[in-house]
Image (cartoon, rainbow, N blue to C red):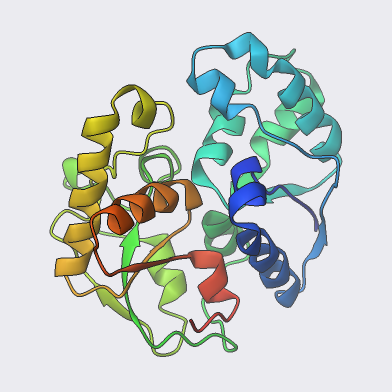
Amino acid sequence: MKIGLFVPCYIDAFYPGVGIATLELLERLGQDVTYPTEQTCCGQPMTNAGCVSDSAAAEALFVKLFSGFDAIVMPSGSCTHHVRAHFDAIEQTDAVRHVRANTYELVEFLHDVLKVRDFPWAEFPHTVGLHNSCSSLRALRTASMSELGEPAFSKPKTLLSGVKGIRFATPARPDECCGFGGTFSVTEEAVSARMGLDKVRDHFHAGAEYIVSADSSCMMHQQGCAERNHVDIRFIHIAEILNGARQ
């Protein structure tokens, strides 16, 4: 399988280690991975702001770079959801339809496509609280939603359970939004900041040393809330743990 790795623009700028860990992890698992160096942004920020037509150039470049791969994998639920559900600013050619149908968030690719369950090189002797972004939870369905009253499941937790030494803390409201929400955190700053603080305190009081997530955007927001309010908790992307980080 030929895999094209997309590293979202904000990860490339602020959390390059997440992109490196994703590449190394996929290669550890025997995958043929290419990172097109001309990649920029998937166009999500413009579409989220209501400027759909302004996403066209970013979407067209994305399709040009990734349409030749069997699968496109990225360490971000929100970007994955954008490609699948909102790649509408350009003509829907066969190449566009191929890209939309074969783009995966890292967790679902590992869990559903490669069906990996063990990570023998990984050890993380810490207690973690698992945060699922709204996009990964309610759009990609990588975990169960409490509002549906459905049987509990969690693809990220299934993967992390294959890591030696890891322990899980259970916050009181495990699938509540952290308040980031892209432009929401700008237009409703006070509400967003309070939601983020509530989230990190919930994990902290549950005994978590780390908050782990498949979305660095949510963690960036929560980390800022934690630091401003002196909540002693750390943050790490799931790709880094699965790739063997032992911070």
Picture residue at 75% right of the left edge, 12% below the top? 91
The image shows a total of numbered marks equal to: 0
Residue 97 image position (x, y, % from top left) = 71, 27
Q: Examine the image and state in which quarter residue 45 appears.
A: top right
Please give left or right for residue 215 compared with residue 239 in the image. left
Residue 17 vertical placement versus 148 (above, below): below
Q: Nearer the viewer, residue 34 or 110?
A: 34
Residue 98 image position (x, y, % from top left) = 74, 33
Picture residue at 58% right of the left edge, 81% below the top? 244
Residue 115 vertical placement versus 113 (above, below): below
Q: Nearer the viewer, residue 238 or 233?
A: 233
Q: Assign the N terminus to one quadrant of the image.
A: bottom right
Q: Examine the image and state in which quarter residue 209 appears.
A: bottom left
Residue 215 vertical placement versus 65 (above, below): below
Picture residue at 48% right of the left edge, 56% below the top? 214
Residue 29 vertical placement versus 194 (above, below): below
Residue 198 visible in image: yes
Residue 75 image position (x, y, % from top left) = 58, 53
Please give left or right for residue 78 compared with residue 139 in the image. right
Residue 215 visible in image: no
Residue 20 image position (x, y, % from top left) = 69, 64
Q: Examine the image and state in which quarter residue 186 appears.
A: top left
Q: Nearer the viewer, residue 145 or 89?
A: 89
Picture residue at 50% right of the left edge, 84% below the top? 246
